[in-house]
Image (spheres, coloured by chain):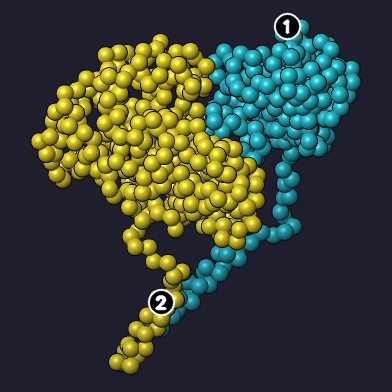
Chain colours: A yellow, B cyan
């Protein structure tokens, strides 16, 4: 072979054309897909992704399903309807959510973030595995009101889904296990770890004086239930909201009288977006929550012993704790385009 | 250059010869037919109501005088094991079946891959074992699409019985028996002896075990008589659900084997 100038040009052009032809599709992701990145100062996840490793296609299928109104019986409500990204994936500032036909739900929609660390889900902990979590809202007559069989039929009849299932799971078969695993991948990917608190933990910045003061107070007065870095210990406690329980709470699941009126300790991250607060959304502001802890705690057999005297705070202490709580708001994940409606 | 070509030719010939010598002579080849060492067993659940054959949509009278007509009868059979006289046991892997009287034939469990031999007893579970209740989304008989899984309190409905009863406060009954741990587990496991019969498994025959399932015992188990009036809707785990699951289980007996 003679390597003349003309030959070199020809082979170079051929190379360029061939490499161009190797592109399989027109989609060019902005950044390469990283999967779930566990922050170094977080504990290991509870969900172990057995037979369900996070892949870009699994995550994207989960995202599409999350925002798909077809999953409700009258095609009006998607998961995203009550779990709105702008509200930290909680509802739009309402105490109770509205499902199909304007039906009002029973409890405040919790936000979706850091889900893979939770051992149980729902205010009463009735759901014990992330993969079966979506079934509750999907099938509840007050929420999306559908059946698994109907949902699968809708997906099978929607031409956009079989190729996505094939990409994610290797064949065009659409079944509930695959759908639920895709949901688990999407939910697990929504990690909130870029609040100011997180940046301080990573040594990227420091608290102001009042924030630091609030942090010290927090560790003394709140951390035993709202334990860092997830800001919940995932336990079920009665925090003195009621003496009689319209909502039985954890007792509904365990039937243990000691669990009457106990609800899951929620994370204190992202309070700026996820108001109102408590299992029935009765407190619309943090001040009202702190008022409750200061003078509103009422006695019952199952009242948490840590709250028997409430949590009295001076005005200065309250201001400091509020300043600290503000550092738990993560303005990144509420705007993260990866989790947005496609 | 000439040396290289020669070496290349010799090399190619050597390779060709090697491969040709590996070719088997068909006349000398021994044809080995693998000996089949397993067979299939059919486990048939035959439903009765006392002395009568049981069918959906038919009214029956309980011992307490209540009239019950079933629209739905579904339950899990799982973790099938066969035992030999020498004490050895074969456990079926991934052993989960949903008997659903609305699905023809689902009451006949196809159990394949059973090692050849003679068996004296069968063990099975009515319900789903505790591990699989907390293992996330599953397929086949354990798929959520079978409407046998609680969305609000993660776990399987082991037995689902629904129907009408004029003596019920709301005219109907619904028993969704679940719960898989502790004192109020609705999961029951039992061993049933074939004695004096033997289950003979081999590749050439498919023996059929007939189990009698007397639905009347759900109400009339002398240990815990139940009436619809006592409770027409049990859809949560608890002592009542566990008792009724026991009642259901008490109605199961070995009948006979067709070898």
Q: Residue at x 22, y 39 (%)?
A: A327
Q: Residue at x 12, y 34 (%)?
A: A210
Q: Residues within 10 Å of mark 1 (few under 14, many from 20)?
A: few
Q: Residue at x 42, y 67 (%)?
A: A27
Residue A45 visible within the image: no
**Image quadrant containing the N terminus of chain A:** bottom left
Horizontal and vertical percent position of residue A4: 31, 92
Q: Residues within 10 Å of mark 2 (few under 14, many from 20)?
A: few
For label 2, the SS is helix
Horizontal and vertical percent position of residue A92: 40, 44
**Image quadrant containing the C terminus of chain A:** bottom left
Chain at tag 1: B
For disc 1, the marked residue is B223
- A5 in relation to A15, above or below: below
The one of B116 and B160 positioned closer to us in this rendering? B160
Residue B12 visible within the image: yes
The one of A3 and B24 positioned closer to us in this rendering? A3
Q: Is residue B3 left or right of residue B40?
A: left
Q: Residue at x 35, y 38 (%)?
A: A275
For label 1, the SS is loop
Count of marks overlaid on the render: 2
Q: Is residue B80 left or right of residue A243?
A: right
Horizontal and vertical percent position of residue B246: 69, 15
For disc 2, the marked residue is A20
């Amino acid at each position: 072979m003679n390597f003349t100038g003309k030959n070199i040009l020809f082979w170079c052009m051929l190379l360029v054309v061939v490499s161009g032809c190797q592109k399989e599709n027109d989609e060019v992701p902005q950044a390469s897909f990283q999967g779930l990145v566990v922050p170094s100062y977080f504990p290991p996840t509870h969900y172990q992704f057995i037979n369900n490793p996070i892949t870009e296609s699994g995550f994207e299928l989960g995202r599409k399903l999350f925002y798909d109104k077809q999953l409700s019986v009258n095609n009006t409500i998607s998961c995203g309807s009550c779990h709105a990204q702008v509200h930290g994936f909680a509802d739009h500032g309402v105490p109770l959510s509205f499902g199909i036909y304007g039906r009002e739900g029973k409890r405040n929609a919790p936000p979706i973030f850091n889900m893979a660390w939770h051992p149980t889900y729902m205010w009463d902990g009735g759901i014990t595995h992330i993969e079966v979590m979506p079934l509750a809202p999907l099938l509840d007559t007050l929420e999306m009101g559908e059946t698994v069989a109907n949902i699968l039929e809708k997906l099978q009849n929607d031409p956009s889904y079989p190729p996505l299932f094939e990409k994610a799971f290797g064949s065009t078969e659409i079944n509930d296990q695959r759908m639920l695993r895709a949901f688990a991948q999407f939910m697990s990917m929504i990690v909130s770890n870029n609040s100011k608190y997180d940046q301080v933990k990573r040594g990227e910045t420091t608290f102001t004086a009042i924030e630091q003061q609030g942090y010290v107070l927090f560790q003394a007065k709140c951390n035993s239930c709202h334990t860092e870095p997830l800001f919940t210990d995932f336990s079920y406690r009665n925090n003195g909201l009621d003496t009689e329980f319209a909502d039985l709470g954890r007792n509904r699941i365990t039937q243990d009288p000691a669990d009457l009126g106990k609800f899951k300790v929620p994370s204190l991250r992202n309070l700026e977006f996820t108001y109102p607060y408590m299992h029935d959304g009765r407190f619309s502001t943090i001040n009202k929550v702190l008022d409750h802890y200061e003078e509103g705690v009422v006695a019952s057999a199952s009242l948490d012993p840590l709250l028997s005297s409430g949590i009295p705070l001076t005005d200065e202490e309250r201001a400091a704790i509020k300043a600290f709580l503000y550092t738990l708001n993560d303005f990144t994940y509420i705007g993260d385009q990866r989790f947005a409606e496609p | 250059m000439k040396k290289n070509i020669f070496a290349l030719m010799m090399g190619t010939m050597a390779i060709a010869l090697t491969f040709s010598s590996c070719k088997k002579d068909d006349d000398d080849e021994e044809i080995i037919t693998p000996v089949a060492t397993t067979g299939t067993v059919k486990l048939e659940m035959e439903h009765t109501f006392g002395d009568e054959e049981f069918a959906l949509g038919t009214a029956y009278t309980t011992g307490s005088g209540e009239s019950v007509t079933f629209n739905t009868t579904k339950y899990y059979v799982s973790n099938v094991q066969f035992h030999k006289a020498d004490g050895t046991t074969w456990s079926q892997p991934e052993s989960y079946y949903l008997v659903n009287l609305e699905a023809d034939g689902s009451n006949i469990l196809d159990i394949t891959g059973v090692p050849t031999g003679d068996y004296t007893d069968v063990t099975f579970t009515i319900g789903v074992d505790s591990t699989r209740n907390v293992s996330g989304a599953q397929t086949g008989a354990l798929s959520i699409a079978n409407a046998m899984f609680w969305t609000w309190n993660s776990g399987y409905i082991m037995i689902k019985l629904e129907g009408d009863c004029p003596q019920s406060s709301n005219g109907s009954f619904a028993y969704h028996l679940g719960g898989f741990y502790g004192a109020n587990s609705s999961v029951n496991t039992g061993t049933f002896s074939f004695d004096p019969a033997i289950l003979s498994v081999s590749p050439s025959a498919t023996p059929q075990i007939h189990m009698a399932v007397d639905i009347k015992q759900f109400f009339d188990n002398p240990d815990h008589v139940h009436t619809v009036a006592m409770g027409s809707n049990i859809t949560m785990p608890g002592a009542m659900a566990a008792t009724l699951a026991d009642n259901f289980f008490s109605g199961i007996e070995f009948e006979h084997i067709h070898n």
